[in-house]
Amino acid sequence: MLMHERAEILGDRAAFQETRILQMMRKPLEVSGELVYRAPDYLRKTVVQPEFEELEVVGQRLYLGDRDSRRRLHVDQHPVLAGMVAAIRGTLSGDLVSLEDHFEHDFNGTQGAWRLDLTPRSIEVAEFIKAVTIEGEGSRLLRVETRYANGDISLMQMQSME
Amino acid sequence: MTAVSIEEWAGTLVIVAMLVLSAAFVAFHLEIEADLESFLPVSADPHTDEMEQWSPASGSANLILIAVEGGEGHQRVAVSRALAQWLRMDPRVNRVMNGDADNLAAVPASLLPYRYLLSPAVSSQRFSAEALEDALARLLRRLSGAAGLADHGLAMWDPTGELDIIVGQWAGSSPSGRDLGVWVSNDGARALMLLEASFTASDLDAQEALLDEIRNGFGRLPGVEGVALLMTGQGVFGVESRALIRAEVLRLTAVASLLVIFVLAFAFRSPRLILLSALPLVSAVLVATAVVGALFGSIHGITLAFGVTLLGVAVDYPIHLFGHRRQGELADDTMRRIWPTLRLGLGSSVLGYSAMVFSSVNGLVQLGVFAVSGLVAAILVSRFVLPRMVPIDLGVPRRCPPRYRFLHFSPAWGSLMVLACGIIAPTYLVWQQDSVWENNLSALSPVTEDEVALDARLRADIGAPDIRYVAFFRHRDSEAALRASEALSLDLEALVVDGVITGFEHPADLLPSASTQMLRRSSLPAAEILAADLESAASKLGFRASAFEPFLRDMEVARTLEPLRADALPSGWPETGLERYLTRSDEGWTATVTFRGVTDPEYLMHWFAARDDGWHYVDLKWQVEQTLEQIRDEGLQRFFVGALFIVGMLSVGLRSLRRGLKVSTPALLAALVTAAVLVSAGESLSLFHLVSLLLVVGLGLDYALFFHSFSGESDRSWQARRALIICALSTIAVFGTLATSPLPVLEAIGVTVALGASLAWVFALLMSQRLDTGG
């Protein structure tokens, strides 16, 4: 299994550009910001445009906040979020156990250029997410594409800053 | 030597038949009650039922506060989830709240359209063009935020978020801290859970079974290594207290029995006599229980416990019988010799205790009947059954008893001491008046300080209402009760602002009155206006107007909905907790309001008193303490009336008021001095002390009568004194053992009786010497 052979990374910081195509919107939403990962289990997604908001994941805890306040999220009310966190963090850390908890996965390509296809295992997550595709080079993520059950799509491109 | 007459044998037969009947009644018919209500006075308060329901002693509000402590944070959360999930399947559990279920799944689908009638946010402004634009702008911010597309499923259907508001209200008071959705304390050290059981807190057997089940189930959960389970609540206290009292009583009974057996063995040297000594007491308890059960339909647990204490004097009867026997004397002859004295002692005790029978406090009446019937049974058994079972010469001591020179004060000294005590004790008690009585109920509770502290901590963590303060409103119509609760809540908001309370819960928060629902319904915009406003807001912000069709459809349904009414709801509507705040009885409906963080109870009380709008405010703790105070005051009154009866009876029996006073003085004085000594030692007196003092009086009367009737330096007098020493020693052994108990109630009874009996004995001796010379 190639995923095992990927070099473990201690951390990464990347700028992201995300296009969200929603059924309820007439035009796609453009969102950009920064994504930070620190081994083994810290993940932060900071949206800068259109408005500052930060999602921080430390171990099992989720925090969401803007510049003024921050609140801890009830993860069971956000199974989708929990699933997304597991997908990205699992891929970065190579933590197969946590990834396999949430998704069936299919790894293709080489160390240099790879592609990981994820399908949710739990009914709870599958109710919202149809599939996640992650593409990368070596230990870096380049692109995350999420297809939602209601037809919404999110395309996220990343560019490493480290 | 006189032969036993036919009449006496007939008496024996009658009494044995009475015992057999009593035993049969107790075995097959007896019902023991445990609720405080039947022990308390019949109250004129029309809200007794509701108070009963909310009172900690019983009531449907059987909440168990649970905390998971130790281990890692995620471990506690996982354990809390698993435990809650498992407990929710238990039929004995109404609901389990730990945060992980206050989500939209809790709302029954049939009620979903009602959100526009139930949400307090609904008004004519709620769906205006601006408000809709605001709501959609918020939605847009969420969709383009860091959490992204995680959850917008409900937005098309409930863009203004009414359901969130309703579910938040159903969750009621809940801790602010959350870890992965599960309730945690503010410092994050404990995961918290609130369980509402389906049975009352006073059903201790059911409670114990459930608590055991929870502990066992917790132990079997995965990942509980290093994690501890903490539980508290009235029901938990009840079970723990009962277990503690049972273990204590078992231990104390064993120790006390051994000590008494030792005393009796030393005195009589006969196992048979030791066994027979217990016969009058056992018969007394049996008959008294049967009589109370037959007269009142059931017997209260408290009556039984206090009653057995009062009957302690019955152990003295066989001791007198055995102690007064001479060589070669038939026990029947001994009994005839001491019978007049025994009879007079019993007569005065019975008269004294019967003062309680004419009380308005049900518990005191039961106790009086119990004591009187038990004592009569004990003396009848001692007179007609016991002597027949003692073989001639068995256990008759051969040696003369000591003459206790060490107790031979000169009569002058004796009377001086008695006089001094008689002046000092009552004066001291009157002087100390205010600090004499124990008014804090918890001081007598067997619950330890640690448990009380844990309860306070968890209650604060969870933000559970302090069920000490409640207000009731009763009306035959549920709508009127809900309207009253809405009116009150508006005014209570001002008290929250003023800091008198930090919050409150009321039924109309969960189910608004029909008129409020109608008002909200009529404030909903017309279909065309709403569609147009929504369309313009949507196009302004880039949404497709068609996306919100589910919202428009539900609005359409809501416009013609009939309001939800309490009587049409599924019983109690358990998802919401409404059944605790709006209850139905034969007379109608009662709305209940509870308060959180009451900082100024007195202000709150006056505030309600000034309203005069049908709301009835109760401080439950104060109420219970008032009731106990009433019982105590009445008990005290009866005590003095009983004392008068006793003096009168003795004066008639001894054919002299002076002799009557002299024989009753040691007993009554002993009670007074005991009370004074206890108070001066820092004890506050409670009902338990009062009942113990009654026993002291009964014992003291016996001592004084026997000292009086068998005074002098004859053999008769030595035998009497020996018997009296054995009586006192066995009493002190039993109650001295109780005095060592860590349980406040048992300790109070033990100390009072042991001290009182010793004092009564000494006073009786002193007074008898005075009679020897002076009388």
Image: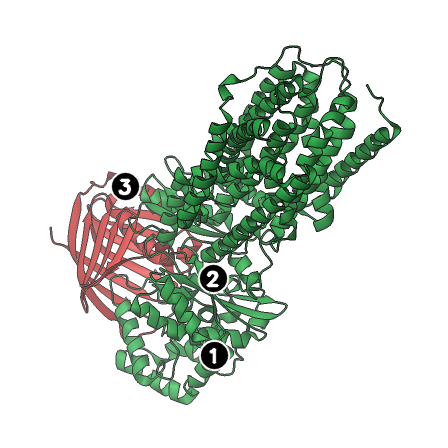
Between B190 and B527, the one lying in front of the other is B190
Q: Which mark is residue B106?
A: 2
Residue B163 sits above or below residue B652 on the image: below
Residue depicted at 45% across the width and 33% down the height: B742
**Residue B269 pos. (x, y %):** 65, 13
Q: Tell me the quarter of the picture where residue B135 sits.
A: bottom left
Q: CA distance from mark 1 to mark 3?
A: 62 Å
State which chain disc 1 sits on.
Answer: B
State which chain disc 2 sits on.
Answer: B
Crowd tier of the residue under label 3, counting other residues whose Cα lies within 10 Å: few below 14, some 14–19, many 20 or above: few
**Residue B362 pos. (x, y %):** 62, 52
Between B189 and B251, the one lying in front of the other is B251
Give the amino acid type for the residue marked by disc 2 in the picture. Ala
Tag 1 residue: B517
**Residue B463 pos. (x, y %):** 37, 56
Give the amino acid type for the residue marked by disc 1 in the picture. Gln
Q: In the rendering, what colour is chain B? A: green
Tag 3 residue: A2
Instruction: Identify the element where label 2 is drawn.
Output: helix
Of callouts 2 and 1, the N-terminal one: 2
What chain is colored red?
A: A
Q: Tell me the quarter of the picture where residue A84 sits.
A: bottom left
The answer as to whether the residues below labels 2 and 3 share one chain is: no
Q: Nearer the viewer, mark 2 or mark 3?
A: 2
Instruction: Identify the element where label 3 is drawn.
Output: helix
